[in-house]
Amino acid sequence: MTSRFEFRPAALAAAGLAGLTLLLASSTAGAAVTFSSFIQSADITAALGQTNTIAITYAGDKFVGTVYFGPNNLQLYQSDLSGGSVQKFGTPLPTGGGEPVVAAGLGQAGFAAGAIYASGSDTNIYRYAPSGGAPVLFGSTDDGSGVRQIFFDPGSTFGGKMIVTTTSGHVLTFDGSGTRALVANVHEDTEGMDIASTNYGQYAGQLLVASEGSGKIRAIKSDGTVTDLQLRNTSGAAVTIALAETVSTVPLDLGLSGNPLEGFYVANYASDVQKADASQFAGLLGDTIVTSEFSSNSALWDLHYNGDVLNTFTVTQVGTLPLQSEDGIFVTAQRINDVHPLPEPSLLVAAALLALGGARRYRRRD
């Protein structure tokens, strides 16, 4: 998002005629994926005094989200795993404005599982403890550009590090100590990202990123090599994706556990957070979902790789969101395991002391 309800003719023109062709052709495409409200608009308003949902992440024992505009723009909120008990999370971000972004650590590369990292879309990134509290400055962008997205590599391609995209097109990595490295520069505002699945052949494990201005989807290797993906509609014509926003790879293990928590969660600006159950993506495992940031009926596109010989991706609309698509995330059994936050150190010490006391009492009874 670059402005409130930004679905404008000029924005579509910036995305290119090909993107417009894809948009118009989609009107007859199948739309199988449907959503229902997960975190209610009224509950967010009760907690923050406003809605304008922008980002959402899964943090093990809760979901943590952000909002756009308004007096509480920099105040994060949380819900329980059922989308209820909505309340403020931590104290507000000390800097920024606009579109705050948020992600939870996966317990790799020195990042604590369930720790929350957020940015007010300025140059700064802050860290919250899993329980909230006051944010601490963690790092900043290399060129003073604004943070557009925060993502944690779930595998080994980028060493499990934090990956950050920016308004200038820089793609950065951070390790748990805050050491920053520039991976690539795509020279335009870049936001949504995820890692390509093994179904993507030569692109497997690469970082997929979207630029809503051009509608391009790019693949980035860990050595910084950037490739523009060759997108085709179902007729084989070259296209771009108008106002491309979220990029979310459908996990190969999505839904295997039967845990009802599994599914796709996405901020439905300016109202609520929506969810699509895992079962709705059964035929799309290993593909990538890209959303278009329209002011209503935002399209969900499936990117299906046609193999290394053709080296093209067929783009098909598979659903819509009720309003404007913003940040989204898949939750799987593996992510549930990875992100579940450990107790705070003080709680661990208290538990150890209680256990020790119990053991001593038990010995005295012998």
Image (cartoon, helix red, strand yellow):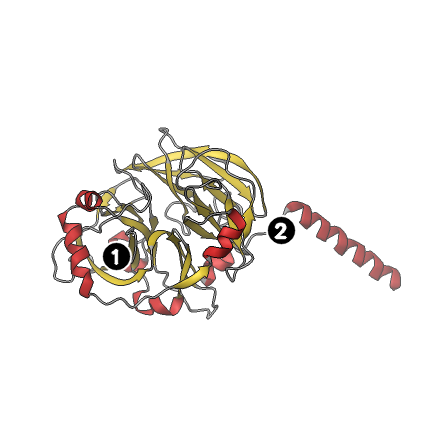
Distance between the alpha carbons at the discs numbered 2 and 1? 40 Å
Q: Quadrant of residue 316?
A: bottom left
Q: Which residue is mark 1?
A: 201
User: Which residue is painted at 19% across and 56% down in the image?
Assistant: 23
Q: Secondary structure at mark 1?
A: helix
Residue 166, by quadrant, is top left
Residue 284 lies left or right of residue 357; in this view the side is left
Nearer the observer, 47 or 14: 47
Q: Position of residue 130 (x, y in %)?
A: 56, 47
Mark 1 neighbour class, 10 Å CA radius: few under 14, some 14 to 19, many 20 or more:
some
Query: Which mark is first along the chain, 1 or 2?
Result: 1
Identify the mark at residue 49; answer none if there is no mark: none
- Judged by depth in the image, the label closer to the viewer, 2 or 1, is 2
- The part of the image, by quadrant, that contains residue 68 is top left
Amino acid at the residue labelled 1:
Gly
Quadrant (top left/top right/bottom left/bottom right) for the N terminus:
top left
Location of residue 293 in the rendering, given as x and y in whole percent from the top left corner: 29, 50
The foreground one among 184 and 50 is 50
Q: Is residue 324 visible?
A: yes
Q: Could you classify mark 2 by the number of other residues whose Cα lies within 10 Å: few (under 14), some (14-19), or many (20 or more)?
A: few
Q: Position of residue 294 (x, y in %)?
A: 28, 52
**Residue tagged 2:** 343
Give left or right: position of 27 versus 322. left
What residue is drawn where x is 11% and y is 56%?
237
Q: What's the residue type where badge 2 is placed?
A: Pro
Q: Is residue 122 toward the left or the right of residue 213 in the image?
A: right
| Residue 292 x, y percent position in the rendering | 27, 52
